[in-house]
Structures are given as C-alpha cells and as structure tokens.
C-alpha cells in the first residue's frame, strides 16, 4: 500500500471528503532526516465532533499502538458522525529505537510542547503536531503506558476544573471512558500534549497501563472499549447498539494530583530495590516504601513516603541506579 507523503503545513484537509477514510504521512523538514507523522483520517457522512487519538508519544509504549491499529480496522466512515483522527505512532524515531526519548536528540516529546519550527527533531515534531493536527481536534485522547523500568496502574487521567467547560467536559468524558481508577489533574506540567490541548481550550483524557514493553490483553481491551465509550459519549457512534458496548466499570478510586512523575521519590544509591508497597496502596507520610541493598544484602538505603497518598508508580526493575525513580505518590480525591 502506497501512502501519500505531504508536508504537514500544506496538507489539504478537504481532500478527504465526508464518508471517506484515508491514510497519509505528514512530513516536516529537519536536516538530513525528514520528520514523519502517520495519520489516519476517518470522516463520517454526517457533521460532528473531531476526536484525535494519539499513541506512542513515547516510543516504547505499545498499548496505545495496538489500540489504534484495532480502531483503524473497526471504525469506518459509515459508523460515525464527525471525524476520527488517529496517529498510531507519534514519535517514529523513538518507536524504531524502542526508546522513551527521541534518539536523535535525547529529548522527551512529552516535555516539548508547543515545540519550535526551528528547533531539534523533537521540538519540531511537537510544533507540527500541535499546529497542524491537535489544532483540528475538539477532543484529545492520548494513550500512554508504563515504562520498562516503571509500572503504573491502569487509569484514565483528566483535566479537573469544574469552573470551566473544558474541565467539566474532561471529567464527564473520563467517567464515560470508564476505568476503576481515574486521576483528576487540577493542573498539569508544561510541555505535554495535554497542556498544549488545555492552552487551546480542548478537553482531554490520557490513559496509563502497566506497560513494561509488554501488552496485557485485559488492560489493552480496557483501552479499546474505553475509546468506543468515549466516541459514544461524544455522540460520534451512529448506531451505538450495534457495538455491544461494555458498560463502564464502577469507579473505585478517585485520585487527585498534578500527575508529574518527574517529581517522584528517587534512589540515592545504586543497588537492588525490594519494595515494601504495591501499586494503588495507600500510604502515610514516612511509611517504609522499600529498601535498596548492596551485593551482600546490606541495606544501603531505606526509603520513606515523602507524603501521604496512594502509590501510582513503582520501580519495576529491581536493579536501580542512583537518581532512578523508586515510586510516585499522589493524593486521594475527597
């Protein structure tokens, strides 16, 4: 199958008509390597909202990629009103390099938005994604999962601001998407896709799963069915009864925090980490969360919870390096 390559800034969005679907590779200039953004466009026959779904902002997170592939096969123009935009692999060099960051410049795409048209590869990728794809959306769903060395529970995160429509719409969408754990973010750090969406007034969700460069089918199924429920919530499914939508699971945990894993508890020594807590365990400030041991079992460091809350991230690989992330703790929404 030949995929047309078109400069992102010159792509004619009206070339895909109502009732049609198309695959296109949007490109941008960046030195010796041209940047590429693979885009699937599905336009229903009827007018409606535009939902943008992103996967592989980090190149070694695969749950989202599989979800988008399955959506490409299952959602056709005759099924929907509005437009479904899907980017199965946002960061192509990171995906090809099996890497969280872009190998070309060592940067984390999820910290570079809104980017720069004159910057490094990652900065340009952020810029073109923001300016020419995100700007077309009425709603953003960004699919993530845990890293090789760091586990995260299955959850959906959303913008929490009941005083603004964007916040109310994000919260309602999170509840419709359906996860046992939902994470409210009154604010998010700069540089993310979701912070770029917030700046544009676009409501958003993101997902997390255990990850580890492995796909657990039960978790990935939650992503796929959540995407269907989100489309139904947005009024995009023309015949929702035909999809046999699974009901959203009851919400068991409502978390609250900024979602900044950069501010996690870090190891102060190299060694073998043995945790004393589990994901989604409630802890009090000062509780033991684990220890780092040396070659002969000597305890090099005992780690304590820096605050009270619930464990939302935990080191997955036992061998940990100094300054490596041990765990992340966030608050519980009252």
Image (spheres, grey):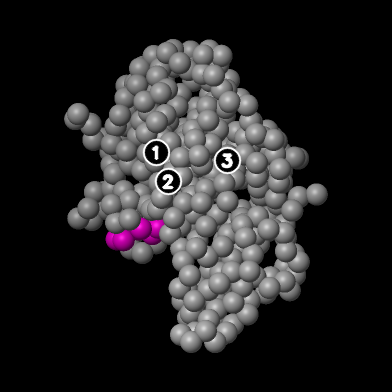
Q: Which mark is residue 215?
A: 2
Query: For the point 50% across and 39% down, which residue is it?
Result: 218
Identify the magenta region.
99-104
> Which residue is drawn at the image coordinates 46% and 76% (left, top)?
321
Quarter-wise, where is residue 231 in the image?
top right
Q: Residue at x 35, y 21 (%)?
A: 21
262 over 22 or under it: above or below? below
Note whether 58 is above or below 42 in the view shown: below
Is residue 222 one of those drawn in magenta? no
Classified by dominant secondary structure, the portion drawn in magenta counts as loop
For the residue labelled by badge 3, is the local secondary structure a helix, a strand or a loop?
Answer: strand
Question: CB atoms at circles 1 and 2 under 8 Å apart?
Answer: yes
Number of numbered discs on residues = 3
On the picture, is 215 further left or further right than 269?
Answer: left
Residue 330 position, x and y percent, is: 68, 58
Give the left or right position of residue 183, taking residue 163 as reference: left
On screen, 287 above or below 176?
A: below
Q: Crowding at label 1, few (<14), some or many (≥20) Cα neighbours within 10 Å?
A: some
Label 3 vs label 1, nearer the camera = 1
- Of labels 1 and 2, earlier in sequence is 1
Q: Disc 2 on helix, strand or loop?
A: loop
Per the model, the C-alpha gap separating discs 1 and 2 is 9 Å
Closer to the chain start, of discs 3 and 2, is 3
- Residue wearing tag 1: 66
On the image, the x and y values in percent for residue 274 come to 55, 72
Q: Nearer the viewer, residue 202 or 63?
A: 63
| Quadrant in which the N terminus appears | top left
């Amino acid at each position: 199958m030949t995929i047309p390559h078109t400069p992102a800034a010159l792509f004619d969005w009206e070339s895909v008509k109502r009732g049609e679907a198309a695959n296109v590779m949007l490109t941008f200039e960046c030195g010796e390597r041209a940047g590429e953004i693979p885009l699937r466009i599905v336009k229903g026959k009827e007018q409606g909202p535009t939902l943008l779904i992103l996967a592989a902002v980090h190149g070694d997170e695969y749950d989202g990629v599989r979800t988008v592939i399955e959506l490409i096969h299952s959602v056709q123009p005759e099924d929907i009103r509005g437009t479904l935009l899907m980017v199965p692999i946002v960061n192509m060099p990171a995906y090809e390099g099996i890497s969280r960051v872009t190998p070309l410049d060592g940067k984390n795409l999820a910290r570079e938005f809104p980017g720069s048209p004159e910057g490094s590869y990652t900065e340009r990728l952020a810029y073109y994604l923001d300016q020419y794809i995100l700007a077309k959306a009425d709603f953003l769903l960004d699919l993530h999962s845990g890293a090789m060395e760091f586990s995260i529970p299955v959850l959906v995160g959303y913008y929490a601001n009941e005083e603004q429509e964007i916040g109310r719409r994000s919260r309602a969408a999170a509840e419709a998407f359906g996860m046992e754990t939902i994470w409210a973010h009154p604010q998010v750090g700069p540089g993310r896709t979701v912070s770029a969406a917030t700046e544009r007034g676009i409501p958003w969700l993101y997902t997390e799963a255990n990850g580890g460069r492995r796909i657990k089918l039960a978790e990935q199924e939650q992503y796929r069915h959540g995407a269907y429920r989100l489309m139904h919530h947005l009024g995009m499914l023309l015949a929702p009864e035909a999809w046999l939508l699974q009901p959203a699971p009851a919400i068991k945990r409502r978390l609250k925090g900024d979602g900044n894993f950069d501010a996690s508890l870090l190891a102060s020594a190299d060694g073998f980490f043995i945790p004393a807590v589990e994901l989604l365990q409630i802890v009090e400030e000062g509780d033991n969360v684990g220890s780092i041991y040396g070659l002969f079992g000597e305890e090099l460091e005992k780690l304590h919870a820096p605050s009270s809350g619930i464990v939302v991230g935990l080191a997955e690989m036992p061998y940990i390096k100094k300054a490596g992330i041990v765990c992340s703790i966030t608050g519980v929404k009252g």
